[in-house]
């Protein structure tokens, strides 16, 4: 039997379907669907990891809901985040992206996405982006009871950020990389009372 409403910690909500979620995923819609089906779940392959890294970079300073609404357009204009295709983008593609109101028209972030694709290509000689990112998986994951217990950085995200920058990546700060780690299951920051806790299968608690 799950916790009663009176027992729920700060930031946890029992929704109308009886399931406990964090407040940011409490309302039906795009964010709840993302929480219920994607957030915290591992993805497969280089392109999928590259997509998550790029979108987290575009999210910096914005809401994730904004990115989710624009994600179909991002996938279209970035060719489903095919690393080799994006790495080949030049001035013509940048100019086109800067005029596309369906995405975030930020020159620095667009140029970083292209540069990050080229940096991803370079990582292949050492095992590739997927193994690189997962090499920063900690020995333990947080066990947040309330929303205030959820970290925004970790020693591992700081190290990941530093290593990515050393390899030529941009818009990969420690907070952004911690969000990436959360999004793909490298850490599990689902609240302990959430029905999604442990859903990735990566962590057993």
Image: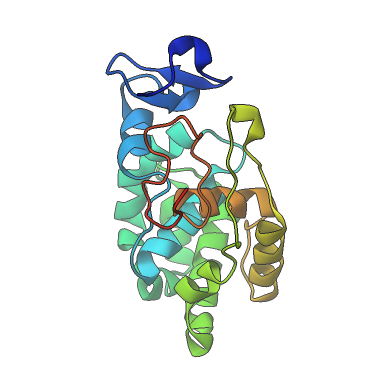
Question: Residue 129, percent across and down?
Answer: 49, 73
Along the line of sight, the residue nearer the viewer: 110 or 130: 130
Q: Position of residue 111 (x, y in %)?
A: 55, 61
Is residue 124 at least partly visible in the picture?
yes
Residue at the limit of the structure toward the top, as seen here: 6
Q: How far across and down, in percent of the image, does residue 5 sit?
A: 45, 12
Question: Residue at image x 30%, y 13%?
Answer: 16
Observer-nearest of 137 and 122: 137
Residue 179: x and y in percent read 56, 47
Looking at the image, the residue that sits furthest to the bottom is: 125
Seen at 65% across and 65% down, the residue is 160
Q: Residue at x 70, y 74 (%)?
A: 166
Say whether residue 204 is left or right of residue 189. left
Relative to 193, 28 lies left or right: left
Furthest residue toward front: 1
Q: Is residue 156 above or below residue 11?
A: below
Q: Is residue 27 above or below residue 56?
A: above
Can residue 102 be seen here? The reply is no
| Quadrant where the N terminus is found in the figure | top left
Judged left or right of residue 168, residue 59 is left
Residue 80 placement: quadrant: bottom left
- Number of numbered markers: 0
Colouring of the image: rainbow
Q: Going 43% across and 46% down the picture, which residue do you hit? A: 99
Image position of 46 with respect to 108: above or below:
below
Residue 13 position by quadrant: top left
């Amino acid at each position: 039997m799950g916790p009663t409403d009176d027992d729920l910690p700060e930031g946890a909500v029992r929704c109308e379907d009886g399931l406990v979620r964090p407040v940011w995923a409490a309302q039906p819609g795009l964010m709840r669907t993302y929480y219920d089906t994607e957030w915290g779940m591992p993805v497969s392959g280089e392109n999928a990891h590259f997509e998550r890294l790029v979108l987290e970079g575009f999210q910096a300073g914005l809401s994730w809901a904004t990115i989710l609404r624009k994600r179909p357009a991002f996938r279209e204009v970035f060719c489903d985040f095919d690393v080799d295709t994006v790495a080949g983008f030049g001035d013509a593609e940048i100019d086109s992206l800067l005029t596309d109101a369906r995405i975030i028209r930020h020159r620095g972030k667009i140029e970083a996405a292209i540069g990050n694709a080229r940096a991803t290509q370079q990582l292949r000689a050492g095992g590739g982006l997927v193994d690189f990112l997962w090499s920063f998986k900690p020995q333990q994951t947080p066990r947040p009871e309330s929303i205030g217990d959820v970290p925004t950085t970790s020693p591992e995200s700081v190290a990941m950020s530093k290593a990515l920058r050393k390899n030529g990546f941009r818009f990969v700060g420690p907070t952004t990389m911690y969000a990436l780690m959360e999004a793909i299951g490298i850490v599990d920051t689902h609240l302990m009372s959430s029905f999604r806790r442990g859903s990735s299968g990566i962590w057993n608690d």
